[in-house]
Amino acid sequence: MNALQQKFQGTRLILGSQSPRRNLLLKEIGVPFEVISSDADESFPEAFRREDIAMFVARKKASALKDHLKDTNTIILTADSIVCLDDLVLNKPTDLKDADRILKLLSGRKHQVFTGVCLMSSKKSTTFFCKTDVAFKKLSQEEISFYLEHYNPVDKAGAYGIQEWIGLIGIEYIFGSYHNVMGLPMKELYENLLNF
């Protein structure tokens, strides 16, 4: 049993996300959890700095699940990822046409992925973020179209999944956490859970 498993004995951990990527990553940390979707409004003030956007939305998601904190041994974990190209925040695409537009913007450029994470109990909460730089090669229209036809970019910030085909053939380098780009910065999460 590792230190985190020891600490979380008797603790109910709720992942407030329907993201299959976050679910997969959290399973690997070895602590049992349950999934309860948060239907929080994900809007944010336009004047926010990029890292503050992700943390602000993660806090909103956690606050929407506060009713589950009546049990004092419960911790809620929520996260939000945003993709930024210069000063432009690229949210989840509205449809495949919008996904095509976003991938063309990212093609041949470097962008940043910010993930904000919130941990909340009945007694306290903490929020942190992680930033990763990602550089795409110049993508051809054929490559973009293939990805859009065979994968589901509409549920992903920036219209791509780093672990999917477009990431395998299109990403030249990343600087920072790979798992952060997937949606949950695992090293930082592990450390924050241990100290929570």
Image (spheres, grey):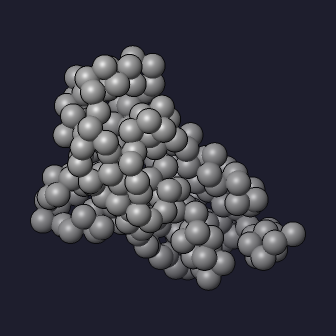
Q: Position of residue 173 (x, y in %)?
A: 40, 54
**Residue 184 sits above or below residue 162 on the image:** below
Q: Position of residue 104 (x, y in %)?
A: 21, 34
Quarter of the rendering occupied by the C terminus:
bottom right
Q: Is residue 118 left or right of residue 36?
A: left
Residue at the extreme bottom of the image, as rendered: 195
**Residue 189 sits above or below residue 150 on the image:** below
Looking at the rendering, which quadrant does residue 188 occupy? bottom right
**Residue 190 sits above or below residue 147 on the image:** below
166 or 71, nearer to the observer: 166
Q: Position of residue 145 (x, y in %)?
A: 32, 20
68 or 104, nearer to the observer: 104
Q: Residue at x 44, y 53 (%)?
A: 181
Q: Is residue 102 visible?
A: no
Q: Residue at x 48, y 32 (%)?
A: 165
Q: Residue at x 30, y 58 (%)?
A: 112
Quarter of the rendering occupied by the N terminus:
bottom right
Q: Is residue 55 left or right of residue 74?
A: left
Q: Is residue 176 visible?
A: yes
Looking at the rendering, which quadrant does residue 52 occupy? bottom left
Q: Position of residue 13 (x, y in %)?
A: 66, 60
